[in-house]
Image (cartoon, helix red, strand yellow):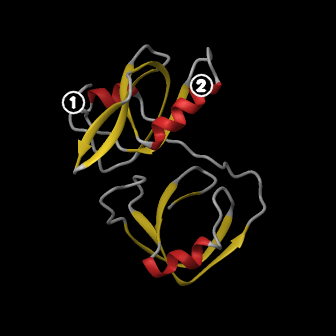
Amino acid sequence: MVLHDEQGDRIHAILKRPQVEVYKTMIKENKIYALRTFLVLDNYQILKTSDHPYLIQFISKTQFTEDTRTELPMMVYDFQSYDMLQTQRVTNDNKLIDVIGKVICKSGVQNHIISGRTERMMELTLGDPEGNRLGCVLWNKYIDQYMEYVTENVGVPVYVIFQLCTPKRYQAF
């Protein structure tokens, strides 16, 4: 789970497996909560949702109070520039990133066998206002979501936002 404050700073929050069902009914996405009584730990996660050095761990005594303030942003993005992603010598695929772009072109849907399972993929090329291009791959259900949107919005330029995605060098790009 990713939490953010009014300045847009993100922090990763974790729950122990037995707590998931308990908190699942208490926490609703896109709501604002004040939290009390939790642990602050070093961010030991391999896959990081932010650069924050710490993470929050909920405990059995963690309390939530819904906050009705409306001035907090519901969505916070940390968009990465195409130039930075392309010139980085080694992509840090342990840090999830946000990317925005206009879809310039797309491939057809392809099937690949990965770990014995058939996975569907589609390649997109995104463009930014400076004319840079960035390759991107959609997998499985995200292909369906993209195709549904494109079918319902024929002739309209398509802009996409990828939030908390994995930056990896793919062989086709």
Identified at 21% across, 33% down, the residue is 89
Q: Nearer the viewer, residue 121 or 125?
A: 121
The x, y position of residue 159, in whole percent, is 55, 26
Q: How many marks?
A: 2
Residue 53 point in image, percent of width and height: 38, 61
Tell me, for residue 91, which label it has, or none.
none
Q: Return the residue found at the far bottom.
A: 61
Q: Residues within 10 Å of mark 1 (few under 14, many from 20)?
A: few
Residue 88 location, quadrant: top left
Residue 140 in picture, x, y percent from top left: 41, 42
Name the image quarter holding the C terminus: top left
Label 2 to label 1, Cα distance in Å?
A: 28 Å
Q: Is residue 100 left or right of residue 6?
A: left
The answer to whether marks 2 and 1 mark residues whose Cβ atoms lie closer than 8 Å is no
Mark 2 or 1: the one toward you? 2
Q: What is the secondary structure assignment of the residue under circle 1?
A: loop
Q: Which residue is at the front of the view, 154 or 157? A: 154
Is 120 above or below relative to 95?
A: above
| Residue in front for this viewpoint, 106 or 39 | 106
**Residue at the spot x=48%, y=59% of the render?**
11
Question: In the rendering, at what x and y percent does residue 127 appear?
Answer: 45, 19
Numbered mark located on residue 171 in the image? 1
Q: Which numbered disc flags the more N-terminal residue, 2 or 1?
A: 2
37 over 149 or under it: above or below: below
- What residue is shown at x 54% (from left), y 76% (from top)? 21
- The residue that label 2 is drawn on is 151
- Residue 108 occupies quadrant: top left
Question: Residue at 64% of width from left, 26% of height from top?
Answer: 152
Label 2: which secondary element: helix
Query: Which three-letter amino acid code belongs to the residue tagged 2?
Result: Thr
